[in-house]
């Protein structure tokens, strides 16, 4: 992008906005649109990588610049149909093409959500709907652009989850050349389905590992504070999660509500103190977070069927 920005600056383009490590936005005056096309061709020829430009409509006033920008982004979405290395102008697109692209992006969002939720049945269904769009394409090149567009959207989506598509699948950019080897849409769909199933499984496993680690840290945090009145809200604030999310996750992983689990930890710790120390009953109660002795005794009886004193005598 530094090379591209320098090339634009050399041609007198002053309004340059860096959008990402792969995109720049350039602002031209209306009378200089033809010059923008010439700049694109000259700059493209001097680069070692492909360059595609999307041109939005004219913004009559500064507050309409955002509309022109969004139109340019929309035009870039058509790279999957037009191919790389072209100038794609929003005003040249017809309503059907725009509607199809909107439908495609909505469908991809649904597919990626199903993948993240490990809903393989829904992934299968969403892919079927997605490839109905590919069935209307009249050239092999268009289908290949369509497939690459899906992969790049998938790459961008996984980045929002702090995941890398190629690392997850053990691939590199050259591996995507396999897309050109498929002779039918059915083969391409089957390949994508396998890959997305694999990603869904990997994300699910990684999520499970992260969840188990988090639950283990939560339990350790509570165990260190059994003498205090520790609450789910306090634990949630410590780990930077919402109490509702953490409570639901805890129930899914342990099979118990957070409050029930804390009681279990306190009761187990009380048994340990009753059997291994000579602390008074009220001292044991205080060590496990109970300031009101009758309440501690009642909860102990409900858990073990006997009072703390009966438990100690039985031992």
Image: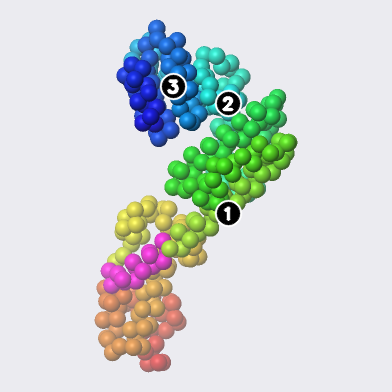
Say which label, 2 or 3, has the lower sequence index: 3
Main secondary-structure element of the magenta-colored stretch: helix
Q: Which of 311 and 63 is in front in this view?
A: 63
Provide residue 204's location: percent of width, then percent of height. Answer: 54, 55
Front disc: 1 or 3 = 3
To which quarter of the image does residue 23 belong?
top left
Quick check: marks 1 and 2 in contact, CB under 8 Å? Answer: no
Query: Can residue 226 be found in the magenta stretch?
Result: yes
Q: Give the alpha-carbon distance from disc 2 to disc 3, as whole Å.
A: 18 Å
Look at 58% across and 23% down and name the residue there: 82
In the image, the segment drawn in magenta is 214-228
**Residue 315, relative to residue 81: is it above or below?**
below
Q: Which of marks 1 and 3 is nearer the N terminus?
A: 3
Residue 267, percent across and down? Answer: 38, 77
Mark 2 neighbour density, 10 Å: few (under 14) some (14–19) many (20 or more): some
Identify the residue position indicated by label 3 in the image: 43
Which residue is label 2 attached to?
83
Tag 1 secondary structure: helix
Mark 1, residues whose alpha carbon is within 10 Å: few (<14), some, or many (≥20)?
some
Q: How far apart are marks 1 and 3 (CA)?
A: 43 Å
Q: Is mark 3 on a helix, strand or loop?
A: helix
Point out which mark residue 201 bears: 1
First of labels 1, 2 by sequence position? 2
Instruction: Determine crowd level at label 3: few under 14, some 14-19, many 20+ residues with C-alpha closer than 10 A.
Output: some
Report if residue 224 lies within the magenta region: yes
Give me the residue at 46% from left, 56% from top. Answer: 248
x, y percent for residue 144: 64, 32
Which residue is nearer to you in this view: 261 or 171? 171
Residue 23 seen by the camera:
yes
């Amino acid at each position: 992008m530094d090379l591209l920005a320098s090339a634009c600056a050399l041609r007198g383009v002053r309004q340059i906005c860096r959008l990402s490590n792969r995109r720049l936005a350039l602002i031209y005056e209306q009378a200089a649109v033809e010059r923008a096309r010439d700049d694109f061709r000259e700059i493209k020829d001097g680069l070692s990588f492909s360059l595609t430009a999307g041109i939005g409509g004219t913004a009559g006033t500064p507050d309409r610049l955002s509309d022109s920008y969004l139109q340019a982004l929309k035009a870039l979405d058509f790279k999957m149909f037009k191919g790389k290395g072209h100038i794609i102008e929003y005003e040249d697109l017809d309503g059907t093409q725009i509607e199809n692209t909107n439908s495609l992006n909505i469908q991809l969002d649904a597919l990626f959500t199903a993948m993240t939720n490990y809903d393989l049945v829904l992934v299968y269904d969403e892919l079927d709907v997605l490839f109905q769009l590919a069935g209307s394409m009249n050239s092999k090149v268009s289908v290949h652009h369509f497939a690459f567009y899906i992969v790049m959207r998938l790459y961008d989506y996984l980045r929002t989850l702090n995941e890398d598509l190629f690392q997850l699948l053990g691939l590199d950019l050259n591996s995507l050349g396999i897309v050109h080897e498929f002779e039918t849409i059915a083969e391409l769909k089957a390949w994508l389905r396998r890959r997305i199933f694999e990603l869904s499984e990997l994300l699910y496993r990684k999520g499970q590992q992260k969840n188990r680690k988090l639950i283990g840290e939560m339990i350790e945090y509570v165990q260190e504070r059994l003498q205090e009145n520790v609450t789910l809200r306090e634990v949630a604030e410590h780990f930077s999660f919402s109490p509702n999310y953490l409570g639901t996750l805890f129930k899914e992983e342990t099979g118990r509500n957070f409050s029930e689990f804390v009681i279990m930890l306190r009761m187990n710790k009380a048994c340990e103190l009753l059997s291994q120390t000579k602390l008074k009953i009220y001292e044991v109660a205080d060590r496990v977070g109970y300031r009101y002795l009758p309440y501690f005794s009642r909860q102990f009886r409900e858990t073990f069927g006997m009072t703390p004193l009966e438990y100690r005598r039985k031992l």
